[in-house]
Amino acid sequence: MKRATIVLVGLLLVGVGLLMLRQGRRERATSSLTVYCAAGLREPVEAIAEAYRREFGTEVRLQYGGSGALLGTLRVSRTGDLYIVADEGTLADARRLKLVREAVPLATQRPVIAVREGNPKNIRGLSDLLRADVRVALTSPETASNGRIVRQALGVEWDRLAAHAKTTKTTVTEVAQDVTLGAVDAAIVWDSTASQFQGLEAVSVPELNHCDESASAAVLETCTRPAEALKFARYMAAPEKGGATFRQRHFGGVEGDAWAERPELILYSGGVNRLAIQPLLTSFSEREGVSVTTVFNGCGILCASIKAIAGSGSGNLPDAYYACDICFVPPVGNFFPEGFILTETDIVIVVPQGNPRGIKSLRDLAAPGLRLGLANAEQSTLGYMTQGLLRSEGLTEAVRKNVSVEVPTADFLINQMRAGALDAAVVYLVNAAPVEKYLQVVPIHHPGAKAMQPFAIRPTSHHRQLAGRLLSYFRENHTRFEEAGFRWRGEEQPIRSDEIKLPKWLRGNGGAQAVHLGARASSRLARGGAVSKGVSDAGLH
């Protein structure tokens, strides 16, 4: 009886296992993506999709057409996961129509004249296409990216060519096929298209040599699984995955991110940005299906950490750096040569409600017996800039006599103020906003009492595209920064690190060693940093 029970339990376990296996296979088989793909990209994309299916079990259902024609389809159908488009102009149209979100560049291509092997009509330039003995096929500018780009490049000459053309078709593959069949003598196609058809050769012409276009995979607004769609897009772009397939088929290369099924992006950020970006980092990670490891700390400590890692040759440099002010970009400018200013905030004095000590300016911080809190000039941007403000007003010595506490992070100063341990502290305005019921803000009337926060991407990072999408995500969600108390400046052009000059009030600042740290100071300050998965607990700046 006991033996029969054991056998029965065993059979039940086997049955459950088989059921789970069958269910897993069913789920694996039904995992799919619907992708609308420009016809000229069909050959490499099909090969990449098959490799992806074998590796991850995801079916990629491909629908082909001219980029413009597919755009019309998407406006009506409002379905699908990805849109693989052949040119930037059509992608811009899709963005304007709010059909797509993130875009991942895949490859480049250029218009050329396709002729039969050996060039029997001796076609050497665009003027030869207008000869009476030459039959020409073109792609429609309304349906194909190729036709659109060529029309833009040729201007009025396009009208003459279009009038002479024997046929105009919706995709580059159709006109290329016409040349191989002898239905026409020449067609304008992409260089990558000509290389995919046996018996064709490409003739480059000066009028079109500047027309390199980037093909991209864009996530559709209708996509319900963006993490899976972006995973396939990253796979297509990765140099060792889809990128190799594009190169084999004579597409121009794009420096895609190194392949990782779940990439890890490392972000160093001054703590002042934390309140605004922490929830955005969480939602970005979920949407992208990636990990973001964030280090929040004073920018002096962050710069020291970057230098220490670079000097030791061990550890991972950050992929992106979001500083508290542009003055802390030049110290690591060789790693981050340019930055995009996203926000700005004021430097202010905070006092208890009612301002019992009657503080109205920086000069009042020198009042006898005042308990003052400042940020550390070596470890933080706030401290460095505060020291510059005091120096420019000739108040350094008088005010420093009242400093009760000097810390690398402004949140500690706010906590000390709430606890009644300080009479005044110098912080960022955004630090004070969450506690406005308890603390009163005293503005500092000085042109230097303002910090601008730049976002920079390391050019040598293996996750440059991912970091670029994080920057775009911040820009798309700029209202989150404004709600946190920042003034938004995210639409400005980037600023080069080597063009950033210290303002007059910071020149000669006694805290300048924080900007140009030596190796010993770098190592010392770097030990003040902290790293953790997701968001660190290093504190606010």
Image: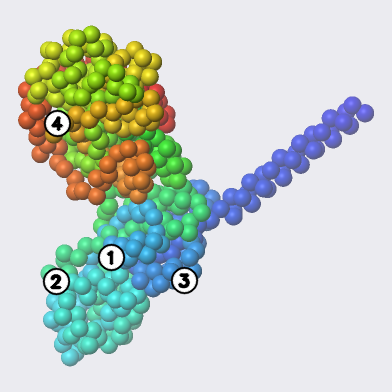
Secondary structure beneath disc 2?
A: helix
Residue on which disc 2 sits? 207
Proximity of marks 1 and 3: CB atoms separated by less than 8 Å: no
Which residue is more in the foreground, 72 or 538?
538
Secondary structure beneath disc 3?
A: helix
Which label number is shown at residue 89?
Answer: 1
Residue on which disc 4 sits? 446
How many other residues sit within 10 Å of disc 2, few (<14), some (14-19) or many (≥20)? Answer: some
Which label number is shown at residue 298?
Answer: none
Report x, y in % for residue 47: 42, 58
Secondary structure beneath disc 1?
A: helix
Mark pair 1, 2: CA separation: 19 Å
Q: Amino acid at mark 2?
A: Glu
Q: Is residue 70 above or below residue 32?
A: below
Mark pair 4, 1: CA separation: 46 Å
**For the view shown, which residue lies furthest in the right direction?**
1
Q: Amino acid at mark 4?
A: His
Does label 1 or label 2 sit earlier along the sequence? Answer: 1
Residue, x 67% and y 48% (percent of image)? Answer: 23
Which image quarter holds the C terminus? top left
Mark pair 3, 2: CA separation: 36 Å
Q: Is residue 283 left or right of residue 95?
A: right
**For the view shown, which residue lies furthest in the bottom direction?**
132
Which image quarter holds the N terminus? top right
Proximity of marks 1 and 2: CB atoms separated by less than 8 Å: no
Which label number is shown at residue 76?
Answer: 3
Which of the two discs, 1 and 2, sits closer to the camera? 1
Q: Amino acid at mark 1?
A: Gly
Report x, y in % for residue 310: 23, 26
Residue, x 19% and y 90% (percent of image)? Answer: 133
Report x, y in % for residue 80: 48, 61
Does label 4 or label 3 sit earlier along the sequence? Answer: 3
